[in-house]
């Protein structure tokens, strides 16, 4: 395959798209696809039909990076014209060393850069008429029609030792609450029945703005999780909270669940229970009162469902730490639990912690 690409955009304006990673990356893909459709590009499902392929990568753990590199390689072999974006895009040198044929590389939420690269190498459909080829008000969605992800912020202020998300996506940047509510309204008007609220840390929403008061439809609203939940709860659809940390102010949204205004559901990535391991992880909100808080939540809202994920085999974890986690889980009685062996990630500070990884 030749790497020579004409500097003059050509083609029929057909774009293939591969979206990897978490729901937050999926929302990025939706935004890119929406802009491409607005610009006159058609989205096609096969390599053969596409004039160019965009790969939105994941770079959270090494296995995800390898999956991203494999997807890029497949797209190059099957199509030849590939643009790379997403979290692994921050490692542009590694991508180009592995696949020198890629046309452009950008990092996460670099929407304009991705769209600009597509324009550089492939022209939009000449038959496109923006007055008749309409894109729905809610944009292009990659989820089934009955639910949609509602991303309320980018980045994260935490510095967990096993995670490199802040180095890829930056510090917390909360979306203006008016913009979030506008998007939620468009989704509901389009027939969405369930809004899945997502971010790196949903309970930190507004911290970076000092909970600035915004406005929506002439109504003042604080840029804060509780205010957002109250407003979303008035839309008459299911509202489900993901990626919440057990901060004290989470107590304030539990009554909304008990009253049926939002779903009695919390996705809380506890990651471990041993105080020693949590300290090594530099996890936020790892005080010893978490079990007490869970009991309090269930007293207020007995229907509450809690889902969580945990890492085992973290560097320095002992058998006693692991047993502590099992005992904690037995007492917490969470409703859904996922457990994953620790995966070392290049650039993560946990790699410097004494103690070898071992399988369980």
Image (cartoon, grey):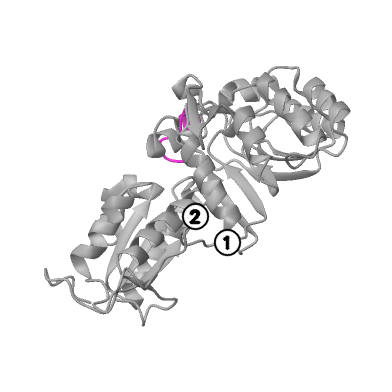
Give the answer, above or below, for where 29 lies relative to 176: below
Q: Nearer the viewer, residue 306 or 196?
A: 196
Percent across and percent down for residue 314 are 61, 34
Query: Residues at badges 1 and 2 in contact (C-beta under 8 Å)?
Result: yes
Q: Quadrant of residue 301?
A: top right
The structure residue drawn at horizontal position 74% and vertical position 32%, both measured from the top left corner, is: 322
Give the answer, above or below, for where 220 lies relative to 133: above
Q: Which residue is mark 1?
A: 143
Percent across and percent down for residue 337 are 75, 44
Q: Earlier in the sequence, mark 1 or mark 2?
A: 2
Left or right of residue 57, residue 344 in this image: right
Q: Which residue is mark 2?
A: 26
Gap in angstroms between the C-alphas marked 1 and 2: 9 Å
The structure residue drawn at horizontal position 67% and vertical position 32%, both measured from the top left corner, is: 270
Q: Nearer the viewer, residue 233 or 296?
A: 233
Give the answer, above or below, for where 253 lies relative to 142: above
Could you say which disc has been placed on residue 32 in the image? Answer: none
Foreground label between 1 and 2: 1
| Image quadrant in which the N terminus is located | bottom left
List the single residue furthest toward the left: 7
Label 1: element kind: loop
Extent of the magenta region? 344-352
């Amino acid at each position: 395959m030749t790497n020579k690409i004409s500097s003059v955009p050509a083609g029929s304006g057909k774009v293939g798209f591969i979206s990897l990673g978490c729901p937050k990356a999926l929302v990025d893909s939706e935004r890119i696809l929406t802009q491409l459709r607005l610009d006159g590009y058609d989205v096609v499902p096969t390599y053969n039909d596409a004039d160019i392929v965009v790969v939105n990568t994941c770079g959270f753990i090494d296995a995800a990076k390898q999956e991203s590199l494999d997807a890029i390689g497949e797209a190059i072999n099957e199509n030849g014209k590939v643009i790379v974006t997403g979290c692994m895009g921050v490692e542009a040198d590694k991508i180009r060393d592995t696949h020198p044929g890629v046309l452009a590389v950008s990092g996460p939420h670099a929407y304009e850069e991705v769209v600009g690269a597509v324009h550089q190498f492939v022209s939009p459909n000449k038959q496109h008429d923006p007055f008749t080829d309409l894109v729905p008000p809610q944009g292009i969605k990659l989820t089934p029609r009955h639910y949609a992800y509602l991303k309320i912020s980018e980045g994260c202020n935490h510095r967990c030792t096993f995670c490199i998300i802040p180095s890829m996506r930056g510090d917390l940047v909360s979306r203006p609450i008016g913009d979030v509510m506008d998007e939620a309204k468009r989704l509901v008007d389009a027939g969405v029945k369930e809004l899945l609220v997502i971010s790196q840390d949903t309970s930190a929403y507004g911290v970076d703005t000092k909970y600035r008061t915004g406005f929506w439809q002439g109504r003042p609203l604080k840029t804060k999780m509780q205010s957002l939940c109250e407003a979303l709860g008035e839309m008459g659809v299911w509202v489900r909270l993901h990626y919440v940390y057990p901060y004290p102010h989470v107590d304030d949204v539990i009554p909304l669940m008990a009253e049926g205004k939002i779903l009695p559901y919390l996705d809380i990535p506890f990651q471990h229970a041993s105080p020693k391991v949590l300290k090594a992880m530099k996890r936020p909100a790892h005080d010893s009162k978490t079990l007490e808080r869970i009991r309090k939540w269930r007293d207020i809202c007995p229907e509450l469902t809690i889902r969580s994920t945990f890492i085992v085999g973290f560097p320095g974890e002992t058998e006693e730490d692991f047993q502590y986690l099992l005992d904690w889980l037995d007492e917490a009685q969470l409703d859904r639990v996922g457990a994953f062996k620790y995966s070392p990630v290049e650039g993560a500070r946990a790699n410097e912690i004494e103690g070898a990884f071992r399988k369980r």
